[in-house]
Amino acid sequence: MPINFHPHSGTVLVCDFHGFVEPEICKVRPVVVITPRLPHRSGLVTIVPISLTAPRHGEPYVVRLSKNYHPSEEDDLPCWAKCDLVANVGTHRLNGFKVGRRLWETPDMTDDDLKRVRAGVLHGLGFGALLKSE
């Protein structure tokens, strides 16, 4: 059952990508919402998928997260945000994590992880030079 609210930035949800065509993501995956609700875009959410599969190459657009946000899995399982796969999807594709009978959770990502994911998105779009060097 899809969510019936517009999620805020940093909300971790499950997205059903069925109907997409390879090489796009075509299965159900955890995702993080990276933008706030924008005017005139009700029903659309910008997300980045999360994966337990380690990257083959150390690219700046694949961000290691500080913890695994899936409520039914161990927190210390390594996971990565695949920031080159940013997408705009309808809220009808999004759901919380089912943790019981008629019970879903929608965890929030830490501010630091969300900031690093957003920086990874800039790298994934080829705009890494826009980031201020620290």
Image: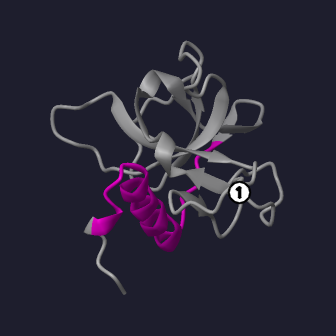
Residue closest to the far top: 19
Give x and y (percent) for residue 125.
Answer: 36, 49
**Identity of the amino acid at label 1?**
Cys
The residue at 46%/70% (across/down) is: 111
Whether residue 6 is visible, yes or no, is no
Secondary structure category for the residue under label 1? loop
Asked whether residue 66 is drawn in magenta, I would say no
- The residue to which callout 1 is attached is 79
Against 7, residue 78 (above or below) is below
Against 75, residue 70 (above or below) is above
Q: Nearer the viewer, residue 61 or 90?
A: 61
Please identify the quarter of the rendering in which residue 49 is found: top right
The secondary structure that most of the magenta stretch takes on is: helix
The residue at 43%/28% (across/down) is: 91
The C terminus - image quarter: bottom left
Instruction: Point out the stretch of residues depicted in magenta.
Output: 105-129
Give x and y (percent) for residue 99.
Answer: 76, 41
What is the crowding at mark 1: few (fewer than 14 residues within 10 Å), some, or many (at least 20)?
many
Against 10, residue 133 (above or below) is below
